[in-house]
Amino acid sequence: MPLSDKSELNALLCKAGIDADTASAVMDIDGMLQRWRRRAMKRELGQRALEQLHVGIDLAQFDVLVAILGSPAQFGENEGETMVATVAERLNIDPSRASRLVSEMVEKGFARRTVSQADARRTIIALTERGEAVVDAVRAYKYLIMGDFLASWDSGELAAFVPMLKRFSTWMNGMDLVGEKYSADIAALAESIVASERA
């Protein structure tokens, strides 16, 4: 019977020492995350914000502004000055693409090039006042939409949800250790793929 059958998945997780309630939660969460991922890939909220705020840039360009700003919430602690290479690293894009996008933002007046305070031979990138205003406005737009949604939650729900979401957001951090723990189960799953090809 295929593992797409819920009872077979339950059996696999049970064999691995994961109780039925947790197994059911895992399957529900996975389904929700897949739906969320599809919507997030479309970036509906960001698109709508840029359109309704009449900014005149696309999402890739907006991402560059956010990367130049270097929000610790998104990219971790800011380690000093931002260069084109920093933008490329933060956005996980090719340095030549980052350079082109940064140049576009400079030409449009959202960013500026300046000389490093630490090393005069180095060029750094910073947001102009206009660039900061765009990032602030889009962020505020998103917060209004999310705030409206969460406004109907009571304080107890919010107090429980936020720490749990923070905790959940780290679930992939231990993948290597978990992979070792279930190496036999993973090997069996790989073998089931090979067996299906022989059938």
Image: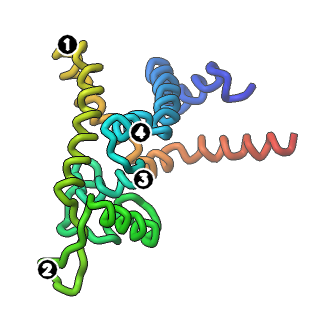
Q: CA distance from mark 2 to mark 4?
A: 37 Å
Residue 54 position by quadrant = top left
Instruction: Report the residue marked by disc 1.
Output: 154
Q: What is the number of the mark on residue 60?
A: 3
Query: Earlier along the polypeptide chain: callout 2 or callout 3?
Result: 3
**Image quarter in which the C terminus is found:** top right
Q: Amino acid at mark 3?
A: Ala
> Measuring 27% from the left and 36% from the top, which residue is drawn there?
166
Within 10 Å of disc 4 (Cα), the crowding (few <14, some 14-19, many 20+) is some
Q: Amino acid at mark 2?
A: Ala
Within 10 Å of disc 2 (Cα), the crowding (few <14, some 14-19, many 20+) is few
Q: CA distance from mark 3 to mark 1?
A: 36 Å
Relative to 38, 144 lies left or right:
left
Q: What is the number of the mark on residue 47?
A: 4
Query: Earlier along the polypeptide chain: callout 4 or callout 1?
Result: 4
Query: Earlier along the polypeptide chain: callout 1 or callout 2?
Result: 2
Query: Earlier along the polypeptide chain: callout 3 or callout 1?
Result: 3
Q: Is residue 179 visible from the viewing direction of this image?
A: yes
Do the numbered discs 4 and 1 sit on residues whose CB atoms are within 8 Å?
Answer: no
Q: Nearer the viewer, mark 2 or mark 4?
A: 4
Q: Nearer the viewer, mark 3 or mark 1?
A: 3
